[in-house]
Amino acid sequence: MKDSGPAEQLELRLRQIEADKSGSYDPRTEHLDDQGNTIFINRLILEDSPYLLQHAHNPVDWYAWGNEAFETASAENKPIFLSIGYSTCHWCHVMEVESFDNVEVAKVLNKDFISIKMDREQYPDIDEIYMTGVQLMSGQGGWPMSNFLLANGKAFFGATYFPAASFIHLLHQIADSWQNKYRELESSAVKLSQSIDRLLSDRKAAVSLDSTIIEDTLQTLFQREDRSFGGLAGAPKFPQEPLILLLLDWAGRTRDLNAIGFVERVLDNMARGGIYDQVAGGFHRYSVDAQWLVPHFEKMLYNQSQLGLVYLEAFQLTRNSFFSRICAQTLNYVVAELQLPEGGFYSATDADSEGTEGVFFVWTIEQLEAVLERSELEFVVSVYGLTQSGNFEGSNILYLKKSLDQYASEFEGSDFYDQLDRILNKIYKVREQRIHPLRDDKLIVAWTGAMITTLAKAAYEFENESWLQAAEQAAELVCSQNIDDSGQLHRIYLAGTVAISGQLEDYANFSQA
């Protein structure tokens, strides 16, 4: 019998891993045989990252980040295509379906490139290097990030999302340049690498900070404020939690009315908007518009930890009961839906379900009519601004047209808040029957550390035993699983295993926790 070659031996090994992992992940590909088995498989099946496993059955011959890919590129004299993203990234999914699960795209990549897929949440330090390069070249960044590298890892070109046709055209251009203009690519890579190093590795002598630096920073924030909708002017709008925490700290020290006003406007508008999940609590990652209405629907643990702390500190400063309500709902959401059974917290949930962005979170009036009594429906339509035409692709993102206190003052009958929470709980139970967005089940120590801190502080303020217990269990899990016998911290915990050396943010956040 003729011995099988290296390619056949590799596939046999990967298929065995696929069989061993059966049921532990959902293969994402359109390429299945008549029995429903995957047609393609690549080295990403060896990985634990949910993001990498999403691409394990692409026809692209992916490598994970590591020496093997770079050594192969050097040996075969091929450029490297490095794609960086994360599991709950909407446009990463779009490019996955359009390009990476596309046989025609895969043919070009497999012939002319060595392709690496990287989870940015595993390697934020490496992601920062290549993102800096993309921003230098294009003036903007984002994910999916598409980089083209020499075999030594230096990038000569980078951008973000490409539609399939544009991507194929770009691949042909780069393959041609590799053959005919290599010196130019090499020169570009050296110049870009030097620029990145200057930005990220600049070393200066220690100096005393100007005593007015905080006041100057705050004045800049005040000038850039969107006084109609809160936060910084423009769109898209991110919560910018560190800036709000700076304002809160300053307001607490000085009682500066401008700082307090900035905080109250942004926190009120965010919590009334669609960026906040009015049904279950918790915040989506950002708003695509200036009104905080239409979110990018993924939910990240780090947003919940930081915004939970923001609303807690805002309540402590102002005693505004709306802020305490949002803080409590956000932390209850985390404990109920993002907590691992053994303690600690999942990292994120996706924007998409059933192949559509946001469908899990939005409602038509007819959908609510089917589950609510007439008086309840009228209540929800009035409070949350529902219309027949909707405000998002024919459906409604729930948002508050005015403050809850204003509604409460106008409400006749039983207690407004009791009625509101009873109806929201009813809607929540119905929503729970829907197909949920994908959840990224890995624990990231930096994010869990930040969540522990927020839960512990809020538990003390509100005397909430369940939040304290969740914080303690998370700390115990990280101590028992992510710290090895030598005292080294590992960044990732997933399904009983740990991976990736701890980054500075992991050590800092867990030390604080």
Image (cartoon, rainbow, N blue to C red):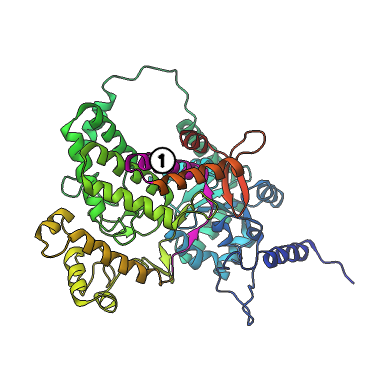
Circle 1: is it few (<14), some (14-19), or many (20+) Cα within 10 Å?
Answer: many
Position of residue 229 in the picture relative to residue 195 (left or right): left
| Rendered position, 111 above or below 251 | below
Q: Residue furthest bottom?
A: 34
Where does residue 354 sit, x and y in percent of width and height?
A: 43, 72
Q: Which sits in the foreground, 257 or 421?
A: 421
Residue 141 appearing in the image? no
Q: Is residue 509 magenta?
A: no
Q: Mark 1 points at which residue?
A: 456
Where, by quadrant of the figure, is residue 410 drawn?
Answer: bottom left
| Rendered position, 239 above or below 246 | below
Q: Which sits in the foreground, 204 or 133?
A: 204
Where, by quadrant of the figure, is residue 189 drawn?
Answer: top right
Where does residue 71 sit, x and y in percent of width and height?
A: 70, 47
Magenta portion: prevailing SS class? helix
Q: Which sits in the foreground, 73 or 433?
A: 433
Residue at figure coordinates x 43%, y 53% from the top left: 335
Residue at figure coordinates x 12%, y 65% from the top left: 413
Instruction: Name which residue type carries label 1.
Output: Ala
Which quarter shows the N terminus? bottom right
Q: Does the magenta stretch include residue 440?
A: yes
Residue 21 appearing in the image? yes
**Mark 1 element type:** helix
Position of residue 89 in the picture relative to residue 24 (left or right): left
Query: Which residue range is magenta in the image?
Result: 436-464
